[in-house]
Amino acid sequence: MTAQLTFGGNSFELAGEAALYWPAHRALLVADLHLEKASSYAMGGQFLPPYDSRATLEELAGLARKYAVRAIYCLGDNFHDDGGEARLEGDAAKLLRHLTARHDWRWIVGNHDPGIAASFGGGVHDEYCLDGIILRHEADPHDPRPELSGHFHPKFRQGIRGRLVSRRCFVRSATKLILPAFGALTGGLDADDPAIGAAIGHCRSDALVHAAGRALCFPLSGGLARSEQGCADADMRRAQHDGGGEIV
């Protein structure tokens, strides 16, 4: 079973919790790797395990092998800061060079890494257009074209039986698809946060969560909390509509 969806007239597949596979181009799309975030924090006196870059790139390499991809597009905030490339530790640097050598690798510039130099290979772009779909870091609410972006690190949060469950999610409207953060050391913003609503132009949107090989779809409400029963009812309607297949 695959978690497929249609966006901008193209078919995609949710790959793991935070990546998007584009079969027509054999391409993998990810956002917000935030490589070398731990070393950035260490410079400010906050010490975290220094293996985030290696873990992020190993997960990305595993998905690239699984889908036998030809191209990889990274939608900005690739490094946590402009000094991240110089700090990239040896094993992670070796893996990144291997990945960029084997794939058509594209870095989209983000707000955390405006000076990215592609020291380890790949091409650098402010934006990129592929089959009429714009790839950029932050959604532009004034652009009517189909668009893939990142920046907000969306997470879907739901209270279930007295506890809060949080999962990385994609946020989809008619013309916007915001990817979750792929990096191993990244937080998240509630998918219903007004900042995300503004970024997609306050249009109707859904949170897509990859779970058990399906894309579970939860309507968003512009920051208004929905009851657990409301979620269950929505899921049941979709499951009945789709005959028990993927819920998109």
Image (spheres, rainbow, N blue to C red):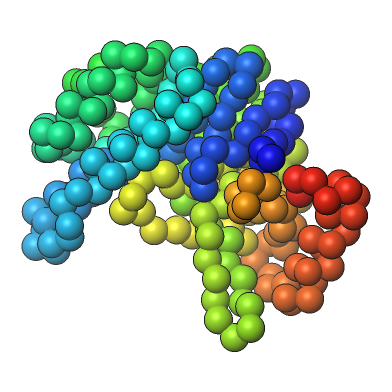
* Picture coordinates of residue 167, whole percent (x, y): 53, 60
Residue placed furthest toward the bottom: 162
* Picture coordinates of residue 152, whole percent (x, y): 48, 50
In the image, is 24 to the left or to the right of 85?
right
Nearer to the camera, 17 or 113: 17
Question: Residue visible at 69% across and 40% down?
Answer: 1
Residue 92 appears anywhere in the view: yes
In the image, is 6 to the left or to the right of 121?
right
* Picture coordinates of residue 237, whole percent (x, y): 88, 59
Nearer to the camera, 198 or 152: 152
* Picture coordinates of residue 232, whole percent (x, y): 78, 69
Nearer to the camera, 22 or 84: 22
In the image, is 149 to the left or to the right of 9?
left
- Location of residue 4 (image quadrant): top right
Q: Is residue 210 above or below residue 8?
A: below
Question: Residue visible at 37% across and 40% down?
Answer: 59
Name the image quarter holding the C terminus: top right
Residue 108 appears anywhere in the view: no
Q: Is residue 224 above or below residue 18?
A: below
Question: Residue visible at 44% across and 47% down?
Answer: 181
Nearer to the camera, 144 or 170: 170
Q: Is residue 8 above or below residue 18?
A: above
